[in-house]
Image (spheres, rainbow, N blue to C red):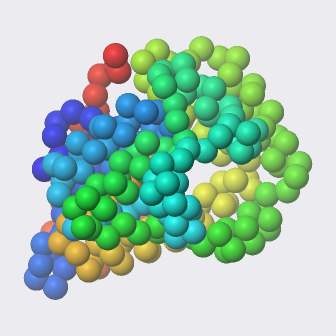
Amino acid sequence: MIPPKGGYPGGAAVRFIYRGEQKHLFLIPYVKGLVREGERVRRLLEEARPEVLLLHISPEELEGLKDLVENHRKVGREALSAADSVYLAVLEVYGEVELPSPSLRAALEYGLREGKPVKGVDISEADFTELYLKHVSFLTRLRRDRALKGALRYPLPPGRPQEALMILDREVMKLKGFRTVESERMKWQGRAVFREALRWKRAAFLQEVERAEESLAELLRRAEKRGEAVEVERFPEEGQEE
């Protein structure tokens, strides 16, 4: 079972019976970009002992991550969007940051080391582009960037980067276009994750902390529909980070 410390909102172990077999699905939220998160995720995976690792990124992004990890390369800041630059600036208040996300890197390295499959469960790049262009206009993107910069005027919660990210996310989700895109992504990911959860006895799903509660609700809905005797054990949240 996951150790008692290290939890974030949405983190949970979901257990259910499917066709007479007990299944375990571990939802592990993480704070993207923070270097120290890599070790936390690594520890949680070692405790969970999953047979398959599911990442919230697309299959194409997973291939890119593999290339970066195998060639020991990082992503330069010049490649970041305006929105990502704001997120990075906020996270630097809480510690050292690095791209690609140390948590995703840790998960991929765990899978490679243990010989476990690692899969990207998000919508494909092509489908995401079509979805994004359909619902997010240039004006909406400008409003998003202004909202994020405006949020920087407010004091950040000391020692709790997960709450800072949620504050930023709430500003973005006020815009209908982004809410629609994220809603569709959560449904897609939920289908993909639950499909894998039915195939394996123990699966781990890494999700950004901002989306973890939505993911948990979607997965529980599917588990209660397809499985039996569904149980949820939420990971206790840590106190303030040092």
Question: What is the residue that sits farthest to the right in this orientation?
Answer: 139
Q: Position of residue 20 (x, y in %)?
A: 10, 82
Q: Residue at x 19, y 79 (%)?
A: 18
Please say if 149 is above or below 118: above
Q: Position of residue 129 (x, y in %)?
A: 73, 67
Left or right of residue 14: residue 169: right
Please say if 141 is above or below 241: below
Q: Position of residue 114 (x, y in %)?
A: 22, 61
Q: Nearer the viewer, residue 220 or 56?
A: 56
Left or right of residue 48: residue 100: right
Quadrant where the C terminus lies?
Answer: top left
Please say if 90 is above or below 19: above
Is residue 20 in view? yes
Q: Residue at x 65, y 45 (%)?
A: 173
Q: Nearer the viewer, residue 88 or 233?
A: 88
Q: Residue at x 34, y 54 (%)?
A: 109
Q: Residue at x 66, y 61 (%)?
A: 181
Please say if 56 is above or below 151: below
Q: Quadrant of residue 239?
A: top left
Q: Position of residue 240 (x, y in %)?
A: 34, 19
Is residue 211 in view? no
Question: What is the residue that sits farthest to the bottom in this orientation?
Answer: 19
Q: Nearer the viewer, residue 233 or 26?
A: 26
Q: Nearer the viewer, residue 100 or 190?
A: 100
* Total numbered badges shown on the rendered structure: 0
